[in-house]
Image (cartoon, grey):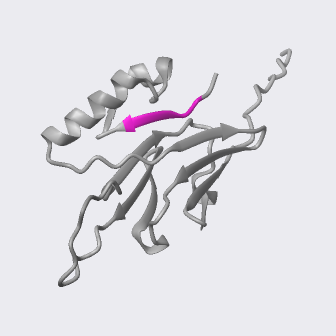
């Protein structure tokens, strides 16, 4: 069973564990909640994978400068934030339409207990953020010998 779970606005959504964050109703619910709260609707696509020793989180952030990306780990929650600001309009420029999404992106992932938090690494290249989270060695049960007195 995959141990990472997504947190949105600080609240754990149990439906994400079952259906994933890709259902149409789930996306519509996020968009409506964000519009009600006055937040811009900016969705970055994220993938979470693991192998024997590491969790790998990859997020698409096209058109965003590395300086506008922040990765934090606090109390077992990995938070990725980014901002894509709309360029200022130039004098004399006439906009016909703009389908590019601007605003702030935030996602939170609850990490399992078996991670080494101080060894988390993040790289950013060609609009792709990759966060690598090493797993701790499994604590194996220790058999304790019983002494006869």
Q: In the picture shown, does residue 46 fall above or below 14?
A: below
- Horizontal relation, residue 29 to residue 123: left or right: left
Q: In the picture shown, does residue 8 fall above or below 97?
A: above
Can you give x and y, in whole percent of width and height, for residue 124 in the image?
A: 58, 66
Q: How many labels does the image show?
A: 0
Magenta stretch, overall SS? strand
Can you give x and y, in whole percent of width and height, for residue 59 in the image?
A: 54, 51
Q: Residue at image x 49%, y 71%?
A: 66
Q: In the picture shown, does residue 128 fall above or below 15?
A: below
Quarter of the image for residue 21 reads: top left
User: Split into 4 quadrants, where in the image is the C terminus?
Assistant: top right
Q: Residue at image x 86%, y 15%?
A: 148
Find the magenta span and give its range. 3-7
Q: Residue at image x 47%, y 41%?
A: 109
Quarter of the image for residue 100 reads: bottom left
User: Split into 4 quadrants, where in the image is the N terminus?
Assistant: top right
Is residue 67 in view from this perspective?
A: yes
Q: Which of 68 and 71 is in front in this view?
A: 68
Quarter of the image for residue 140 reads: top right
Residue 5 lies in the magenta-colored region: yes
Q: Which of 52 and 89 is in front in this view?
A: 89
Can you give x and y, in whole percent of width and height, for residue 33 in the image?
A: 21, 35
- Horizontal relation, residue 87 to residue 72: left or right: left
Residue at the extreme bottom of the image, as rendered: 91
Is residue 13 in view from this perspective?
A: no
Residue 13 lies in the magenta-colored region: no
Q: Nearer the viewer, residue 90 or 50?
A: 90
Q: Residue at image x 49%, y 17%?
A: 18
């Amino acid at each position: 069973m995959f141990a990472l779970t997504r947190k949105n606005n600080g609240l754990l959504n149990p439906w994400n564990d079952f259906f994933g964050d890709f259902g149409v109703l789930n996306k519509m619910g996020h968009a409506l909640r964000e519009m009600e709260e006055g937040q811009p609707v900016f969705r970055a696509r994220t993938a979470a994978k693991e192998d024997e020793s590491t969790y790998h989180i990859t997020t698409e952030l096209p058109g965003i400068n590395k300086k506008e990306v922040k990765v934090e780990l606090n109390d077992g929650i990995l938070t990725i934030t980014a901002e894509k600001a709309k360029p200022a309009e130039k004098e004399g420029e006439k906009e016909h339409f703009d389908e590019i999404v601007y605003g702030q992106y935030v996602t939170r992932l609850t990490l399992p207990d078996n991670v080494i938090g101080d060894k988390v690494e993040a790289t950013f290249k060609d609009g792709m953020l990759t966060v690598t989270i090493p797993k701790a060695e499994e604590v194996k049960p220790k058999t304790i010998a019983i002494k006869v007195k």
